[in-house]
Image: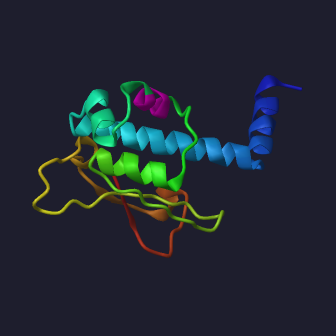
Amino acid sequence: MKTGKSFVSLFKKARERDAYWVEKSILTFTEELYRLVETGNLSRAELARRLGTSPAYITKVFRGDVNFTIESMVKLARAAGGMLHIHVAPDDCAVRWFDIFARESKVIPPWTRGEFREVDTEERGVREHGKPSLVA
């Protein structure tokens, strides 16, 4: 058996397990929290102070070494100046999130400054409710 084929097979098997999706969710949450902290020029020490905890706890959070609850995720997001959003979709959907900032927002994250263009369904490879999609 070729290594590439076995790797694909291993990934397919992993995606069938809840543990895979738990770890993927933790990784996504910590990446988005980190991005929010960086964009807001917030230090780990300041985030810890806002939460009433230690900087060591924040380090553990960014490593994914804590037992996240919805409550802890909400507290972390709010302390970083954000909100937690949870979305459940059918497993055969391609879901894309993007933020729309209020005019009075003082922070414009760098990933939102790009030019957007319409993409046809062949280029996307996915048809989403028959509507064109915008990509950077």
Q: Residue at x 55, y 43 (%)?
A: 26
Which one is in front, 53 or 130?
53
Rendered residue at 34%/41% (across/down): 51
> In the current view of this chain or complex, which residue is farthest to the right?
1
User: Which x, y percent locates residue 43?
Assistant: 26, 29
Quick one: which residue is furthest to the front in this view? 52
Colour pattern of the rendering: rainbow
Above or below, 124 against 46 in this view is below
Horizontal and vertical percent position of residue 75: 39, 50
Task: Indicate the position of residue 44 as horizontal and vertical percent values.
Answer: 31, 29
Q: Nearer the viewer, residue 4 or 61?
A: 61
Vertical comparison of 59 with 37: above or below: above
Q: Can residue 136 be seen at all in this image of the molecule? A: no
- Which of the two residues, 130 or 34, is positioned nearer the viewer here? 34
Asked whether, in this view, residue 91 is left or right of residue 28, the answer is right
The N terminus lies in quadrant: top right
Q: Which residues are magenta?
A: 57-62
Identified at 53% across, 39% down, the residue is 27
Q: Quadrant of residue 54?
A: top left
Q: Residue at x 55, y 61 (%)?
A: 126
Q: Say left or right for 31 vs 13.
A: left
Whether residue 26 is visible to the viewer of this picture, yes or no, is yes
